[in-house]
Image: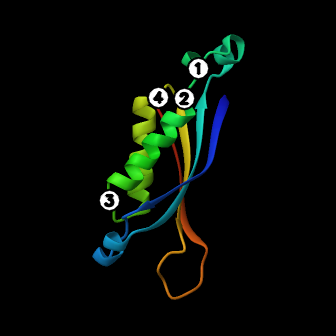
Amino acid sequence: MDKIILKGIRFHGHHGVPEAERQVGGHYEINATLGCCLATAGSTDALTDTIDYAEVVTRIIEIGTQQSFQLIEALAEKIATTILAQFAVEEVHLIVKKLHPPIEQPINYFAVEIFRSNA
């Protein structure tokens, strides 16, 4: 299966278990791999025959910034189901990172990785 890879989609979102964390918000980064057939687009060189990457990025950022979830697992699930419903993809692989989470120990990020398909 062919893949479209979108790495480093960043936004400030309001997610977390404590209410204070949701109010202040934090920084997130999404890596998305979309499984689909790219043969037609490769032959025609037409945007209408592929997935508009900018549209996918816009949708991910809208979900991340306009909705609020306690868990990044729920954020990942919402993004995956939305991409599968709104774009001509067969499968989605996401890595959702919460950058510099507010915990005492120094850490770069927490992340979840999910795979979803229309099968």
Q: Name the residue under label 2.
A: 52
Kindly indicate whether the residue at mark 1 contacts the one at mark 2 (C-beta within 8 angstroms).
yes
| Looking at the image, residue 108 lies above or below residue 113 | below
Q: Which of marks 2 and 4 is nearer the N terminus?
A: 2
Kindly indicate whether the residue at mark 2 contacts the one at mark 3 (C-beta within 8 angstroms).
no
Say which element carries label 2: loop
At label 1, counting other C-alpha atoms closer than 10 Å, the crowd grade (few under 14, some 14-19, many 20 or more) is few
Residue 90 percent across, percent down from the top left: 53, 29
Residue 101 percent across, percent down from the top left: 50, 75
Identity of the amino acid at label 2?
Asp
Q: Earlier in the sequence, mark 3 or mark 2?
A: 2
Q: Which of marks 1 and 4 is nearer the N terminus?
A: 1
| Looking at the image, residue 18 lies above or below residue 81 | below
Kindly indicate whether the residue at mark 4 contacts the one at mark 2 (C-beta within 8 angstroms).
no
Residue that sits furthest to the right in the current view: 43
Rounded to the nearest angstrom, the CA distance separating label 2 from label 1 is 7 Å
Identity of the amino acid at label 1?
Leu
At label 4, counting other C-alpha atoms closer than 10 Å, the crowd grade (few under 14, some 14-19, many 20 or more) is some
Residue 105 percent across, percent down from the top left: 56, 87
Q: Earlier in the sequence, mark 1 or mark 3?
A: 1
Q: Mark 4 points at which residue?
A: 87
Q: Which of marks 2 and 1 is nearer the N terminus?
A: 1
Identity of the amino acid at label 3?
Ser
At label 3, counting other C-alpha atoms closer than 10 Å, the crowd grade (few under 14, some 14-19, many 20 or more) is some
Q: Residue at x 45, y 52 (%)?
A: 76
Identity of the amino acid at label 4?
Phe
